[in-house]
Image (cartoon, grey):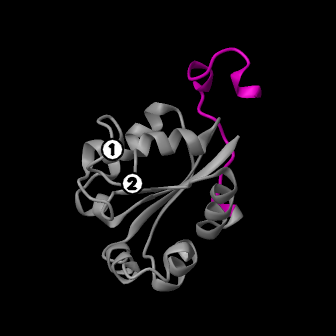
Amino acid sequence: MEQTLAILKPSAIERCLIGEIVGRIERKGLIISGMKMMQLDEKILREHYAHLVDKPFFPSIVESMTATPVVVMALSGKDAVKVFRMMAGVTNGRDAAPGTLRGDFCMSNQANIVHASDSVENGRIEVARFFRPDEIFDYKYSDIEFYYGDGEMAD
């Protein structure tokens, strides 16, 4: 099964949205194979957002992402990257469709409540950045067959 990283950003933590977001992930059928709360620092943010380090707005990313602890999750499932990105919605909450996390819970481009890996490869890299191997658990929900049709889990 594919893995992806989800980060519940300070804007989600401050607004007490942890339970709502985790509940939606569970109800969708993605497996939370790792989860912890941690305080990010500039070092890990420079690595995680390496493509934005030279942008003039990077200091505000560091400021917003270190405002509170975050919740990081490794999510597993068939097409987990695509599924969680669709659940998250487009980056700017003002443009995100109703029913998505950002569409329902944010109005910002930066304070957009969640991070979602953008590719299968980055999902693997990002999960490894935030989790040691012994913090990831390989299991399936006991009712997982009710989330998929015949043979879909084998694909």
Describe residue 93's horizontal placement relative to residue 146 as left or right: left
Residue holding disc 1: 96
User: Residue 68, relative to residue 82: is it above or below?
Assistant: below
Describe residue 14's horizontal placement relative to residue 56 as left or right: left
The one of 69 and 49 positioned closer to us in this rendering: 49
User: Residue 79, relative to residue 10: is it above or below?
Assistant: above
Tell me, yes or no, whether the highlighted magenta stretch contains residue 117.
no
Image point (57%, 41%), residue name: 82
Question: Magenta stretch?
Answer: 134-155
Magenta stretch, overall SS: loop
Q: Position of residue 94 (x, y in %)?
A: 26, 49
Q: Position of residue 93 (x, y in %)?
A: 30, 51
Image point (69%, 46%), residue name: 138
Quarter of the picture containing the N terminus is top right
- Total of numbered circles in the picture? 2
Tell me, yes or no, whether the highlighted magenta stretch contains residue 151.
yes
Describe residue 115's horizontal placement relative to residue 112 as left or right: right
Are the residues at dot 2 and dot 1 in contact (C-beta closer than 8 Å)?
Answer: yes
Alpha carbon of mark 2 to alpha carbon of mark 1: how far? 7 Å
Crowd rating for badge 2 (residues with CA inside 10 Å; few <14, some 14–19, many 20+): many
Crowd rating for badge 1 (residues with CA inside 10 Å; few <14, some 14–19, many 20+): many
The one of 63 and 108 positioned closer to us in this rendering: 108
Q: Secondary structure at mark 2?
A: loop
Q: Position of residue 152 (x, y in %)?
A: 70, 22
Quarter of the picture containing the C terminus is top right
Image point (37%, 75%), residue name: 61
Residue holding disc 2: 91
Q: Secondary structure at mark 1?
A: loop
Residue type, mark 2 in image:
Thr
Residue type, mark 1 in image:
Ala
Query: Extreme right residue here?
Result: 154
